[in-house]
Image: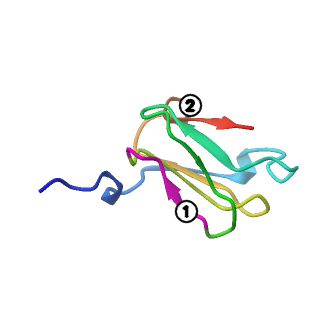
């Protein structure tokens, strides 16, 4: 039986304080650089993983944004989308 990749703990996280202008009408979405999946959180409690489970996103357009990734540098894990 294979394990769900999303069951592993997320090692890194960033919050909206590190993303200046995150509340200026910008959509809360990222692209996983492992599987190229685009995920978007549309409201405050909208927590989502990409299809491979390597990155996740939380928070909506007006809340505290969070990004998570399994390992390494966040720039190698995902990219911000407009």
78 is higher (above) or lower (below) than 13: above
Q: Identify the secondary structure beneath mark 1.
A: loop
The nearer-to-camera label among 2 and 1 is: 1
Residue 30: x and y in percent read: 61, 42
Horizontal placement of 47 versus 2: left or right?
Answer: right
Q: How many neighbours does mark 2 have within 10 angstroms: few (below 14), some (14-19), or many (20 or more)?
A: few
Contact flag, marks 2 and 1 (Cβ < 8 Å): no
Identify the image quadrant of the C terminus. top right
What colour-coding does the image apply?
rainbow
Task: State yes or no: residue 74 in magenta.
Answer: no
Mark linked to residue 75: 2
Q: Residue at x 49, y 35 (%)?
A: 77
Which range of residues does the magenta coloring cover? 46-52
Task: State yes or no: residue 47 in magenta.
Answer: yes
Give the CA distance from mark 2 to mark 1: 20 Å
54 is higher (above) or lower (below) than 9: above
Nearer to us in this view, 3 or 64: 3
Mark linked to residue 47: 1
């Amino acid at each position: 039986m294979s394990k769900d990749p999303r069951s592993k703990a997320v090692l890194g996280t960033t919050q909206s304080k590190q993303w200046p202008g995150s509340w200026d009408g910008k959509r809360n979405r990222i692209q996983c650089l492992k599987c190229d999946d685009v995920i978007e959180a549309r409201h405050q409690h909208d927590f989502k993983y990409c299809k491979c489970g390597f990155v996740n996103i939380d928070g909506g357009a007006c809340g505290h944004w969070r990004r998570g990734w399994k390992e390494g540098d966040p720039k190698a894990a995902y990219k911000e989308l407009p």
